[in-house]
Image: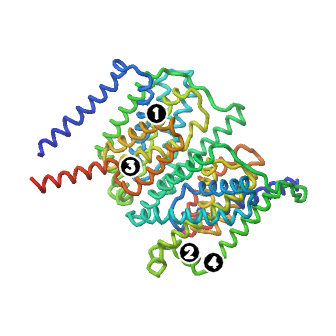
């Protein structure tokens, strides 16, 4: 019994670590930047593919890839925001119109990224093995790579939280999250900050992709599933609340693990039921302010 | 000038549309090629999906991503009832099931606005897909179903009938006081409620009407695919394509979405078999460009060009 509970809880936390990281990225893009980024999962996919390619071609350690993948996805995200979303934001008559049009633009980006990857690497499922030996946890056995994933997810998440809470740029980002117009009036370079947020969101997704590739197989259509999970977690944790997304990720991971234990085929459906109930009952999320 | 415009709108446009319908309906008599039926059926399907999306989302501004759910419900109804009852009934059931689902969803999502409505409707697609998959694989130990085969000409005619019925409905809604009311909901929902419009009922019923046609289109398209499973039936792409086609065509004009659907439907049929990845790549690029630089879509571009033309005429008489 104890082993069973331990098993469910720990595998929930292991899954939750990745969810938390992905959701923090989307929270930055959607909560702060107001871009409902449907292509978020594609950055995860790109991160995972780069890591796989580096590992299989040059034998680069996936943990080293974190340092390579992060800047690449950050630059892609930053450039996308500066070229597309800044333009859309200035032209949109209202924030609601911007949300709609940016969602559709993000959908176009999803197609572009996914099909570039398909054209380069094809539609096969890829994977590599890294630290696949078991680690015993009071009777429950877990692969070492998943524990590495969890610890890195926590480290990255906490580092980013400290960055937001302690630095000047972090303050500007939090100000922009609360009220972009007023933040702009207070001397925050709002276009730059929002672009940085989008870049950081892409960076988190890329890092999450690297971590995902250590434990799971990689293919070009994996992105949308993660995007959907990220959306659920962001709404669960409250829009624009970075800690909310972080804890929301672990909560969803635990729920998923419990449901998987009871009825394996229904975990994704359970996420949706929770998500839809939450949208109806409390659209502001658990830690949301509004 | 004025009388010419009246004659143009009263007689020329309906006459031209009537002629097109007659030409399309009599096509099998003088051009019996399977390829052309298959191509036209696909294009009709895209028009139906796009225009029924526009009926609700165009004037109100609520971006619904539930099209794939209604389409999928139609497909599954066809798979379940196709062997038992006659085809027109199956299509009616497909439409009605989607209609009822839309009533339910509409009643649930009343409080949601803006992006939350989009997220909820999109969640619906994947929720139904996952539940069906679980039901089939875990409970029934099967995956997917076979659908009765119907010949291409019949599919073509039924799709044409659905299309004509939809266009008539869309036109009547647009011209009626309900169309005006929907427009005012899109501009300012609270103000619309204060002028005495039953905002809730109107939104739900319009959403359901649009779902009816999507579901009907799904139940006839299923017969062309012969085998379906939850992933084929509830493909999220069918949620996004109507939005894309409507925006690309331009929602400022009644025929804008139709134009968008015709262009994309044709391009898809021609390109997807030859360059599948590049086709989708081009698709995404066009979407981004259309959103950035063509806020009025293709129709907006044509209108702008015609206005420029007129201005030039006035400048040099």
Of residues B137 and B311, which is closer to you in this image? B311
Answer whether residue B106 is visible to the viewer in this image.
Answer: no
* Tag 2 and tag 4 share a subunit: yes
Marks 1/3: CA–CA distance: 20 Å
Residue sitting nearer the eye, A76 or B257:
A76
Question: Pointer 2: what residue?
Answer: A174
Disc sitting over residue B58 in the figure = 3
List x then y, in percent, for residue A284. 56, 64
Name the quadrant containing residue B311.
bottom left
Dot 2: chain letter: A
Give the mark nearest the N terminus, 2 or 4.
4
Q: Earlier in the sequence, mark 1 or mark 3?
A: 3
Residue farthest along the front direction in this orientation: A58
* Camera-nearest residue between B139 and A201: A201
- Residue labelled with disc 1: B217
**At 13% across and 41% down in the image, what residue appears?**
B4
Camera-side mark, 3 or 4? 4
Does residue B107 lie above or below A230 as drawn? Answer: above
* Chain on which label 4 sits: A
Q: CA distance from mark 2 to mark 4?
A: 8 Å
Quick one: SS at disc 3? helix
Callout 3 environment at 10 Å: few (<14), some (14 to 19), or many (20+)? many
> Badges 1 and 2: C-beta atoms under 8 Å apart?
no
- Kindly indicate the quadrant of the structure image that contains residue B126: top right
Whole-angstrom CA distance, mark 3 to mark 2, is 35 Å
Q: Which residue is mark 4?
A: A165
Considering every residue shown, the one lying at the far left of the view is B317
């Amino acid at each position: 019994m104890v082993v069973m509970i331990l098993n469910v809880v720990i595998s929930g936390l292991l899954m939750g670590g990745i969810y938390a990281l992905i959701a923090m990225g989307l929270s930055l893009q959607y909560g702060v930047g107001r871009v409902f980024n449907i292509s978020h999962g594609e950055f995860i996919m790109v991160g995972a593919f780069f890591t796989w390619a580096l590992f299989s071609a040059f034998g680069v350690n996936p943990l080293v890839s974190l340092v390579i993948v992060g800047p690449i996805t950050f630059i892609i995200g930053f450039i996308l925001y500066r070229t597309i979303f800044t333009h859309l934001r200035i032209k949109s008559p209202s924030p609601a119109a911007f949300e709609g049009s940016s969602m559709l633009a993000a959908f176009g980006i999803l197609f572009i990224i996914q099909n570039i990857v398909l054209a380069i690497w094809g539609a096969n499922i890829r994977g590599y093995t890294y630290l696949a030996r078991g680690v015993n946890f009071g009777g429950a056995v877990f692969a070492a790579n998943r524990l590495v994933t969890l610890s890195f997810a926590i480290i990255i998440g906490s580092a980013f939280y400290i960055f937001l809470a302690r630095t000047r740029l972090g303050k500007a980002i939090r100000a922009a999250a609360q009220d972009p117009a007023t933040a702009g009036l207070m001397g925050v370079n709002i276009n730059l900050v929002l672009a940085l947020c989008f870049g950081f969101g892409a960076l988190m997704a890329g890092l999450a992709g690297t971590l995902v590739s250590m434990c799971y197989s990689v293919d070009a259509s994996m992105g949308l599933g993660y995007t959907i999970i990220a959306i659920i977690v962001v709404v669960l944790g409250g829009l624009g609340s970075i800690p909310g997304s972080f804890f929301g990720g672990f909560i969803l991971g635990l729920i998923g693990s419990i449901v998987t234990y009871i009825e394996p085929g229904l975990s994704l459906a359970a996420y949706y039921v929770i998500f839809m109930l939450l949208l109806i009952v409390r659209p502001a999320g658990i830690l949301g302010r509004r | 000038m004025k009388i010419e415009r009246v004659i143009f709108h009263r007689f020329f446009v309906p006459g031209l549309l009537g002629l097109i319908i007659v030409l399309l309906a009599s096509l099998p008599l003088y051009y019996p090629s399977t390829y052309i039926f298959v191509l036209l059926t696909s294009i009709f399907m895209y028009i139906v999906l796009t225009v029924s999306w526009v009926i609700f989302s165009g004037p109100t501004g609520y971006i619904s991503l539930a099209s794939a759910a209604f389409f999928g419900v139609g497909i599954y109804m066809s798979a379940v009832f196709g062997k038992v009852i006659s085809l027109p009934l199956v299509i009616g059931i497909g439409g009605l099931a989607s209609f009822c689902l839309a009533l339910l969803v509409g009643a649930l999502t009343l409080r949601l606005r803006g992006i939350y409505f989009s997220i909820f409707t999109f969640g619906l697609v994947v929720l139904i897909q996952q539940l069906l998959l679980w039901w089939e694989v875990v409970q029934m130990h099967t995956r997917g179903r076979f659908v009765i085969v119907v010949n291409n000409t019949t599919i073509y005619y039924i799709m044409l009938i659905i299309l004509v019925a939809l266009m008539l409905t869309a036109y009547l809604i647009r011209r009626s006081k309900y169309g005006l009311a929907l427009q005012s909901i899109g501009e300012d929902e609270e103000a619309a409620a204060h002028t005495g419009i039953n905002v809730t009922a109107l939104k739900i019923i319009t959403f359901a009407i649009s779902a009816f046609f999507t579901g009907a289109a799904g139940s006839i398209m299923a017969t062309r695919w012969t085998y379906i499973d939850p992933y084929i039936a509830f493909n999220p792409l069918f949620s996004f394509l109507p939005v894309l086609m409507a925006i690309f065509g331009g929602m400022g004009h009644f025929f804008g979405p139709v134009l968008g659907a015709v262009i994309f439907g044709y391009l898809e049929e021609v390109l997807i078999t030859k360059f599948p990845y590049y086709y989708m790549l081009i698709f995404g690029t066009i979407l981004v460009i259309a959103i950035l630089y063509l806020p009025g879509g293709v129709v907006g571009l044509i209108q702008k060009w015609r206005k420029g033309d007129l201005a030039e005429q006035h400048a040099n008489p």
